[in-house]
Image: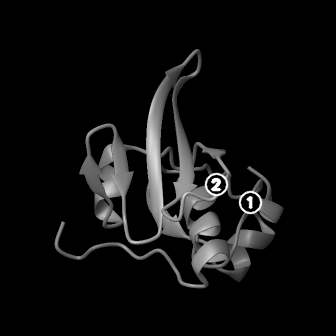
Amino acid sequence: MKASELRIGNLVLDAFGDICDIDFIRICNVEKMKLQPIPITEEWLLKFGFRKDGMYYENAHLQLSKIISKNGYDCYCTDLDFSVFMTELEHIHQLQNLYFALTGEELTLNDKI
């Protein structure tokens, strides 16, 4: 994971395996602080307010699907207007960044879960 992949507020794991959000100090010291990406899981998608619909996870703006690949699970994303694009997502910070790029809004955690 490179600092250039991150934005302030992205969620990552610190050297102790604890979840933290990226701030200015952490973004400047990604390697030194041994920050690691968080893999996308069903638990995380539900925390972000996605609803499971068959093999898909949807919110108001995105539809995600997980397929099995040789590396485990890959998450693919399309928008709900059925625009012709698909991108592979593996980590939470990638999902947060894509969501912001498409909607101009931050992807926020659901406090109810």
Q: Judge left or right: residue 55 versus residue 83.
A: left
Tag 1: amino acid: Val
Q: Which mark identifies residue 99?
A: none
Residue 111 vs residue 65, the one in the foreground: 65
Q: Identify the residue at horizontal 56%, vertical 66% (top origin).
A: 96
Residue 13 visible from this viewpoint: no
Q: Position of residue 51 (x, y in %)?
A: 27, 57
Q: Position of residue 25 (x, y in %)?
A: 71, 78
Residue 82 in percent (x, y) is at 55, 57
Q: Circle 1 sits in a helix, a strand or a loop, which is it?
A: loop
Q: Name, please, the residue furthest toward the left.
A: 112
Mark yes or no: residue 47 visible.
yes
Q: Could you tell me if the residues under marks 2 and 1 are in contact, i.e. CB atoms within 8 Å?
A: yes
Front in this rendered view, residue 82 or 100:
82
Q: Which residue is mark 2?
A: 35
- Relative to 50, is 9 on the left or the right? right
Tell me the residue at 39%/72% (across/down).
60
Looking at marks 2 and 1 on the same chain, the residue that comes earlier in the sequence is marked by: 1
Quadrant of the image occupied by residue 33: bottom right
Image quarter for residue 108?
Answer: bottom left
Task: Please state the horizontal and vertical placement of residue 21, each as a whole percent of the image.
Answer: 53, 72
Dot 2 falls on a residue whose secondary structure is loop
Q: Amino acid at mark 2?
A: Leu
For the residues marked 2 and 1, what is the alpha-carbon distance in whole angstroms? 5 Å
Residue at the far top in the pictured view: 70
Q: How is the image coloured?
A: one colour
Crowd tier of the residue under label 2, counting other residues whose Cα lies within 10 Å: few below 14, some 14–19, many 20 or above: many
Q: Is residue 45 above or below residue 25?
A: above
In the image, which disc is placed on residue 30? 1
Residue located 26% across and 50% down the image: 52
The residue lying toward the viewer, choosing from 75 and 86, is 86
